[in-house]
Image: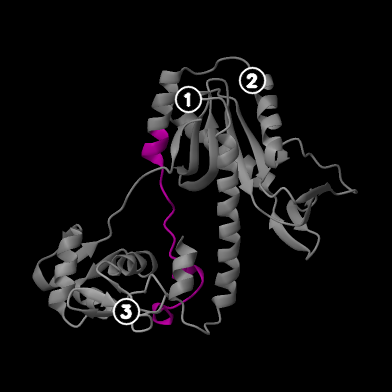
Amino acid sequence: MLTEILQRRLLIGNIKRSEVDKDLSKRWAGYWGEITLDKYLKELPANQYYIFYDLQLKIYGVHFQIDTLLISTKYILIIEAKNISGTLTFDNKFKQLIRLEDNEAFEDPRIQAKRNLTLLTRFFQSNGFKDLPIDYLVFFSNVKTRLIASPEIETELSKVCKAREIFEKIEACETAYQQERISHSEISSMTEILIRNHQPKKINILELYKIAPTDTVTGVRCTKCSTIPMVYRKGKWICSSCNFSSKDAHLEAINDFFLLIKSTVTNNELKVFLHLPSNDISQKILKRLKLASTGKTKSRIYHQHIERSVSPCGTA
């Protein structure tokens, strides 16, 4: 998680730390909400749905992300997962979700889901799949969350569910969409298109928080006690705090560099970031990584390895 990497690398006392900590807490809550949803979806009848998680697509230059996508031969269902505690009310007038305990406002997840529905419809149409019924649900994973409608304005909650109520909502969709609209072979073709077009959005997180690279901690982190930096000695990384040793602790640090600082690195930049005693050692590390590179000898630039995948996908 990119925000987690920033948190562990951010200098203690940085004015952005409280903001980063708060955002990380929200992201972890969202992650566990998606895990809970996944657990429920595994109870669906086998081979009835193709399920995609964290699908990130672009259409006409617009990037959009779908928490969970269910595809069947009869309809397609977008599920927007939320893990927000407390008592929540939907404000239709200003299109927001409000937690009553602290009066904190969130974007209305129904608006998010409707936007994704519109963009996904355009995406499928541009790839030759037309007239497919696409619906959406907003799923709240926390069973203790209270959902109430605003008394002043009539609130449409038919697309909102909590915990195991999701099965009732899916059954309602199955009742509403009974006609076969697409074959399994066509779904296989659709799956290939989705995976091929999955494009995780590139985020410069330092720029997002307006944090300078010099405000981050360099060095290898001890995976046992989290001390930074570890010291390199005779092929091993040694922690000065707990004496833990590792031969590959630098791999996490290199990944941190690529995600936080930039997607390329030179031999000298790696030496400095890892606190290595010589360029020869950093050169050996780079060779073992087998990264793509451009340039020759001292001016050589090594490029971050990019993986393109959807995690995970399959049938329920």
Q: Which residues are magenta?
A: 193-216
Q: Nearer the viewer, mark 1 or mark 3?
A: 3
Above or below, 80 against 293 in this view is above
Rounded to the nearest angstrom, the CA distance separating label 3 from label 2 is 58 Å
Q: Secondary structure at mark 3?
A: loop
Residue 193 position in % (x across, y down): 39, 33
Residue 177 marker: 2
What's the residue at 15%, 78% (across, down)?
Answer: 279
In the rendered structure, which disc, 2 or 1, sits on the residue that comes first in sequence? 1
- Is residue 244 visible in the rendered image? The answer is yes
> Of all residues shown, which one is farthest toward the top?
179
Say if the magenta span includes residue 199.
Answer: yes
* Amino acid, disc 2: Tyr
Splitting the image into 4 quarters, where does residue 58 fall? top left
Above or below, 150 against 231 in this view is above
Residue 41 position in % (x across, y down): 57, 35
User: Mark 1 = which residue?
Assistant: 129
**In the image shown, does 163 or 100 lie closer to the viewer?**
163
Q: Nearer the viewer, mark 3 or mark 2?
A: 3
